[in-house]
Amino acid sequence: MNAPESHTEQAAQRPPRNRRARVAQLIIVGVTVLCLAGASAVAAVVWPRPYPAGEAAAVPIGDTTPLWIEEDYAAESSTYEQAWFDLNTALQTHDRELFLSYAEGDAQQQLALWWDNLSAIGWTTGFITPTTDEDGSQLVNIGVDLGFPANEMRGSGTADAGLILTQGSYYRITTSGSDDALRITSFVPRDIIQPWDEGKIYVERRDHVVLFALEDERELVTRSIDEAEEAAATTLELATRMGGQVPQTGFTSGITASNERLQHWRYGNREQPEGEIDAAGFARSLYRPSQSSELIDPTIATGNATGGTTVILGPGADYDRRAVFIHEFAHAIHYTAAPSQSWGTSRAALEGFARYAEYASGASEFVAYPELTSAVASLGVEVFTDDRLLQEATAGVAYDSAGSFYLFVAENGGDPWALAVDSVTEGRPIAEVAAEMSPALTAEKWQQWVAGQ
């Protein structure tokens, strides 16, 4: 996302390439719904319980329960009512009539809106799974692979290799009937509120990006699509140049000129925490099905790690939209290459990589301004703690410092792509991962490097 709003206003008064007042640079927030360290959408996720379990289904080839999942979360599958099989078949075969036949009243209207909007963006496969919330109420996790199917690369050594990452969300539902007479009678977002839940969207697409907005902002899409495409192509080329196995061919992004809409979609059904930065945009990694079952298309990745990513830009991005797009698209690639396991991921690993993508692409220039050099000298790697990256008063320096660490690694023989991936998959701080790459990449050497810039 962008800088705190006051910083954005200051920056907008000077030419985009004037970096003397570097603290005014864009602060661009990456959001992963499972990342408990300051996640915008869900600060404390309570995993729904699965529906009553029945016979276990065969686990799709290449899909295993990750070692980090506790025994209580071991994959199960259930004997489901016929409606859930038909709903999944409808998502896999794009059968709108079959899908909507299992809804009534307001739920049918809301699910029709959901279906038509996501069809406009495009998908290849999807899922819907019923669950039970902690209070006993009914939920569904429903999602598709929007825009450009993303997956961890085959040969990556992970359980997700070659499987599709979906963008799922949880909705509270009520139902009537049972088996093939089951009908969904209400369908309401549980926590995250998506743009496609709130009205008809307008969509344009290019080779590497799908860009959408609510219908009343269609002109903004038309005005921004070519810039989004250029930023998408630049980000993909950058990741390839870094030696990364790029896990997708494009990005799915929304855009709005309303900061109220942006904050509504960013925080959903919770309030913005006091002191937390406002933002020009965010990247959000969404849900996958939590477990394998006989319902799920076997090409879909399952488990409790993050799923596919969507990007949303707001009016603060107008100051330097190309940089914001590149930053958020870098988050999307990072999230796909290394799906988060929530509690083990530091914000510095994520925000530092996205800021570095700005530097490496030429969208932004690193400047060691006095506030940054002083903070790095006195605080070391504590300059980019999660709290400092989230709070408006410290975020500017924290983002730039985290980005500078990746730049330091890249300019001193290290591998910024490996640093980005390994720090997430291993749940370790970037300074620790870098120091293992080379004795030349210690935190102390980084402090000296920053002082010399």
Image (cartoon, helix red, strand yellow):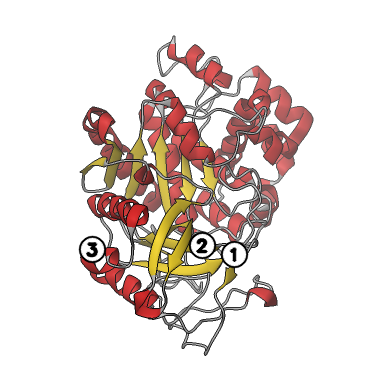
> In this picture, is 312 found above or below 346?
above
For image coordinates 35% across by 75% down, the residue present is 181
Residue occupying image coordinates x 21% and y 65%: 97
Mark 3: which secondary structure? helix
At 68% across and 51% down in the image, what residue appears? 429
Quarter of the rendering containing residue 210: top left
Decide which of 9, 359 is in the foreground and name it. Answer: 9
Q: Which residue is mark 2?
A: 139
- Which sits earlier in the primary sequence, circle 2 or circle 3? 3
Q: Is residue 41 left or right of residue 436?
A: left
Number of the front mark, 1 or 2: 2
- In the displayed structure, would residue 115 be above or below residue 52? above
- 359 shown above or below 110: above
Between discs 1 and 2, the one toward the N terminus: 1
Q: Label 2 sits on what residue type? A: Leu
Residue ID for mark 3? 96
Nearer the N terminus, badge 1 or badge 3? Answer: 1
